[in-house]
Structures are given as C-alpha cells and as structure tokens.
Amino acid sequence: MILLIRHTEVARIWRGRCYGITDTGLSRAGAAHAAALAPEIASWRPDIVVHSGLRRAHHLARLIAATARAEIHAVPDWRERDFGDWEGQTWLQIHRATGDAMDGMIDAPDHFRPGGGETTTELANRAVTAFATLPPGRVAVVAHGGPIAAILGRRQNHTPRDWLALIPACGGSVEIARRDRIATRSR
C-alpha cells in the first residue's frame, strides 16, 4: 500500500503565489498541523517514508519517520511542477501578464510550459515514474498537490482538466494500492 500525503500549509508570504519547485517553508499553523498529523500517519505503520526533498514536504516526512521509526528518503521526482519564471509571482500578476495562458496547462498538456517550466505531461510522467519505482512495503509519500493529482488522474483515466479536483487539501492524504499500472501519457 501507498499513502500519498500533501504537505501542510506553507508560510503566509507564499499564499496566492506560484511556488512549485521553490523551497518554501511552512507557516506556524502548517508546522503545528504537521506535528499533530505525524502520529496519526505513523500509526499507519509505514516501512519507509519518502519525500520530495523540499522543506515543506521534508518537515512532515521527518516527523512521521521519527514517530514510526521508519527509513526516510528524499526523492526529487516527487517535487511539485516547475513553473519556470512564474515561480514567486502572484497568480494575479501571472494572469495580468499572460491573460488566460495558464489554461494551457489543461488545454495543451503536452506542449504548454508555464513560465517556460514543465508541461503537465512531463509532470505526470515524472510522478508516475516516481510511483512505479517506490520500494516494496508500506510507503508513506509526502509530496505536493500536482504529482498526487496526476497519479490519481492517470489511475482514474481523467483528463488534466479534471485533475484539479483530485488535489488533496494541505495535510490531506489518499491511500492507494500498487495493483494497477498507471498510463504514462495524457489523453
């Protein structure tokens, strides 16, 4: 079994901003939420805890691993989407500068590179590969909304337009079996 967990709330300064691969920290509420959540996730008894290597995911992963006495590994393929030069800008600034261009992430998933960063298909293929190469056993993965939604969307044969609804809330999780292979291309 795999437990996919989204990091807890980021620092207030990042709210309303694009922060994909930017290594943001947690808010006070996010750190408190992580501390409260760790024992609950540790009771799931993971053998291994994997995280993206970004601080916002590492914080919760470290707490879970310590509580569960599990191995911990950073795997950069679990990081959030690379938004290129959109990183650090507010979503309003991006919209003012590009209009509806950000719709390209769902309308042209194979070709549109937000801010010159990563296409939706590249994000999804990276996440699917990271999922497929998880070690055996019960694995808790502390990651980000994009990779989690891409994995769930591919498993459920949804188009990228429907993936937004699959992003768990901060600190949210979803348990899934390894049973099925996940498609490696978007539709």
Image (spheres, rainbow, N blue to C red):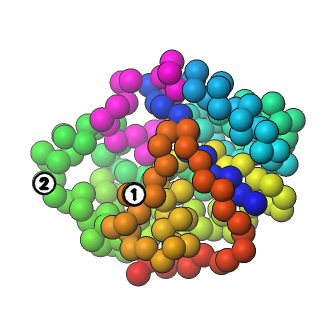
State whether residue 118 appears in this view.
no
Between the residue at mark 1 and the residue at mark 2, the CA separation in whole angstroms equals: 22 Å
* Quadrant for the C terminus in the image: bottom left
Q: Position of residue 106 (x, y in %)?
A: 31, 67
Task: Identify residue type, mark 1.
Answer: Ala
Q: Residue furthest top?
A: 28
State the residue position of label 2.
99
Q: Position of residue 154 (x, y in %)?
A: 51, 72
Q: Residue sitting at 46 percent across and 53 percent down?
A: 167
Q: Earlier in the sequence, mark 1 or mark 2?
A: 2
Q: Bounds of the magenta span?
A: 12-30
Q: Position of residue 68 (x, y in %)?
A: 83, 36
Image height of 172 relative to 162, above or below: above
State the residue position of label 1.
165
Q: Main secondary structure of the magenta part?
A: loop
Q: Residues within 10 Å of mark 2 (few under 14, many from 20)?
A: few
